[in-house]
Image (spheres, grey):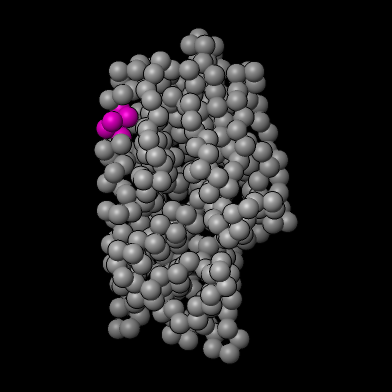
Amino acid sequence: MRILFFGVKLDPPPGDASCGRLVSAPVHYRLELPCDALRLRGGHDATLAHRLWSDPGSGRLVGETSDGRVVDDAELVVLQAYVPAEQVTEARRAGQVVVCDVTDTPEVPEGSMYFALAESMRAAAVAMYHAADALTVSSAYLERYLGESRSCPPVHLLRNPVALAEWGAAEPVREPRRLGWCGTLLERADDCSVLRPWLGAFLERHDLRFVHVGDGAMGVPGWVRTPPSFAEVAGIDPERVERRPVRAFADYLATRPWTGIDVQLVPLMDHHYSRGKSCLKGLEAAAQGIAFVASPHEEYRWLGCGQLAGEDLARQAPREWIAALETALDPRERRQAVDAARARVAREDIGVRWSEWERTYAEALRRRRS
């Protein structure tokens, strides 16, 4: 197969010396890892594009790599970025198969700082999805959510892979000193409100510090916002919070900003947007040998490791969070949990799972040709 992958945020931020390197986690997990594996393990002609445009003559989608190589002969194009539905339709008429990769619901909660921006793009995003030959998604909820529309093309569940080797050695298990959360409050402030009724008192009682990985301004070109602090959203003493900045993904891997976190928290609210999320933060924690406690989200129940704060996302009481965390604080319990999670996440390595992408793309090509 000749496959062209294209995703947003391939350009480095100003002053970043890693010219052309990825700065987006979704692009890394959803495009770069499968692209490399399909090329190296499957022998396919797979390319990750730095730029993408529609050829005015043929209507085909054409990509350009970070080193300037133009790819104009792809038979299948995978998009993890917005492309107008008209261009998707033109590419298909020109003989290309187009697959849209989706990692979030197109609707976000009204309280999100992204709400106005997302709403302004929602109709166009849905039109692009409906114009494609197929969709790939990162969670079972998204598979159901998008598949409910009669206009939707076939939806394929391809959960996020990991590459264990890129995370290096596991964190040491010791007496707990720090809890942590990784994410941007621009997107996830409502999720962190799950922690507000109880986290401050818990930190005080156990004399723990908290690490927020992902602090600072974030957004898209022309729309950048600075969210409130984690301490403000979670209602905890700011003196107990260490703020680590949001980073480009290449720096995220290189600098290991989770270092020193003993237990990672993964709070998720009960609404469409959070229900559509994957279990990526649990995968990343497990890959680094860090214990985690998560909301009882469908994808974390599927993952089957770590501690869950209850059984139902709609009813995750403070006492359930506290009970799960109390268990995770015990070094012996945490060592067992970390070992089990590392063994579990090894089954999600791209080296094990790459053929899932091969089968999905081959099916999309066969369906178009039949």
The residue depicted at 40 percent of the width and 29 percent of the height is 171
Name the foreground residue: 320 vs 168.
Answer: 168
Residue 187 shown in magenta: no
Name the foreground residue: 310 vs 2.
Answer: 2
Classify residue 145 as left or right of residue 40: right
Q: Main secondary structure of the magenta part?
A: helix
How many dots with numbers? 0
Query: Can residue 240 be seen by looking at this rendering?
Result: yes
The residue depicted at 48 percent of the width and 66 percent of the height is 48
Q: Is residue 17 above or below residue 83?
A: above
Q: Quadrant of residue 288?
A: top left
Q: Quadrant of residue 54?
A: bottom right
Q: Is residue 287 above or below residue 63?
A: above
Classify residue 24 as left or right of residue 147: right
Query: Can residue 316 be seen by looking at this rendering?
Result: no
Residue extending furthest bottom?
57
The residue depicted at 39 percent of the width and 18 percent of the height is 174
Residue extending furthest top?
205
Q: Is residue 363 above or below residue 281?
A: below
Q: Position of residue 244 (x, y in %)?
A: 60, 33
Classify residue 239 as left or right of residue 92: right
Q: Is residue 313 above or below residue 146?
A: above
Report the span colored magenta. Answer: 337-341
Name the foreground residue: 43 vs 195.
Answer: 43
Q: Position of residue 67 (x, y in %)?
A: 56, 69
Q: Position of residue 79 (x, y in %)?
A: 49, 66
Where does the C terminus fall, quadrant-wise? bottom left
The residue depicted at 33 percent of the width and 23 percent of the height is 334
Q: Position of residue 307 (x, y in %)?
A: 35, 28
Where does the N terminus fall, quadrant-wise? bottom left
